């Protein structure tokens, strides 16, 4: 197997998987639908494009810096009703997001060619990429010079790569959290996109475990 590593760092991120009109949620780490959507933007794929080659990639996330979950309260005025017969004076909503989080995302696939295509697109995106919402742009390049790990499994790539963000003195962790796709995983995540145009999704199984923290910074950060 081969793995592509992606760096997701920003002041604000949002990775909702169960949002409705009044509550826009965010998970504590990137969703697969959000990462694939980011890749589709970089590749210039329209919303109606097929996703078969991307959803078959196995995904894992290493949390190098846990974000702080925050909430914004919004009120929209003169909102068109669902039946399009009138408008509502106001519509309140709660929108959640992660502040100051840092994630190392891994995508595992059988062929290096697809991972190299994604790597090139992330370096030269056709459309603007963002971390969950259009206002949340990356604080560092999402692609990394050494992001292609040929012949390396997803688990090994995430466990052995160095820190992707700097820690203040005395703040470094002893362990980091990893959330990774596994057919026998204890959690179900409804975040596998079947069609962005039709907003259809399926589920995957993930497992969460703790890894020993990296012992040094990644060369990308130094």
Image (cartoon, helix red, strand yellow):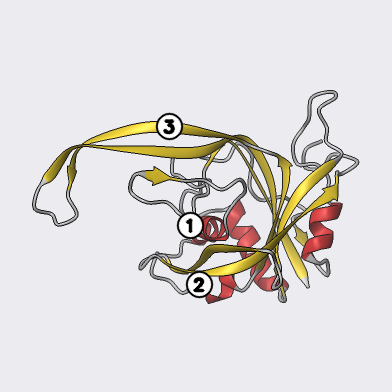
- Quadrant hosting residue 179: bottom right
> Is 115 situated left or right of 26 in this image?
right
Where is residue 216 shown, x and y percent of the image?
Answer: 89, 40
Neighbours of disc 1 within 10 Å: few (<14), some (14-19), many (20+):
many
The numbered mark, 3 or 1, whose residue comes first in the sequence reads 1
- Camera-near label (3 vs 2) is 3
Q: Is residue 84 above or below residue 88?
A: below
Q: Is residue 207 above or below residue 104?
A: below
CA gap, disc 2 and disc 1? 12 Å
Q: Which residue is mark 2?
A: 51
Label pair 3/2, CB-CB below 8 angstroms? no
The numbered mark, 3 or 2, whose residue comes first in the sequence reads 2
Neighbours of disc 3 within 10 Å: few (<14), some (14-19), many (20+):
few
Where is residue 198 shown, x and y percent of the image?
Answer: 35, 68
Q: Which residue is mark 3?
A: 72
Q: Which residue is mark 1?
A: 41
Q: Is residue 84 visible?
A: yes
The numbered mark, 2 or 1, whose residue comes first in the sequence reads 1
Where is residue 56 shown, x and y percent of the image?
Answer: 61, 74
Where is residue 10 shown, x and y percent of the image?
Answer: 59, 37
Name the residue at the right extreme.
215
């Amino acid at each position: 197997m081969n793995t592509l590593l992606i760096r997701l760092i920003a002041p604000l991120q949002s990775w909702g998987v169960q949002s409705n009109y009044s509550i826009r949620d965010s998970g504590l780490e990137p969703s697969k639908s959000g990462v694939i959507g980011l890749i589709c933007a970089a590749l210039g794929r329209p919303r109606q494009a097929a996703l078969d080659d991307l959803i078959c990639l196995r995904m894992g996330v290493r949390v190098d810096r846990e974000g702080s979950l925050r909430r914004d309260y919004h009120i929209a005025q003169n909102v068109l009703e669902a039946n399009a017969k009138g408008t509502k004076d106001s519509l309140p909503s709660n929108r959640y997001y992660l502040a100051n989080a840092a994630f190392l995302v891994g995508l595992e696939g059988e062929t290096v060619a697809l991972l190299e295509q994604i790597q090139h697109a992330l370096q030269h995106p056709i459309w603007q990429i963002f971390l969950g919402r259009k206002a949340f742009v990356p604080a560092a390049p999402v692609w990394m010079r050494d992001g292609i790990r040929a012949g390396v499994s997803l688990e090994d790539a995430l466990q052995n790569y160095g820190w992707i963000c700097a820690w203040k003195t005395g703040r470094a962790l002893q362990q980091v959290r990893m959330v990774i796709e596994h057919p026998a995983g204890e959690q179900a995540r409804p975040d596998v996109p079947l069609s962005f145009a039709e907003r259809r999704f399926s589920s995957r199984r993930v497992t969460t475990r703790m890894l020993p923290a990296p012992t040094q910074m990644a060369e990308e950060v130094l």
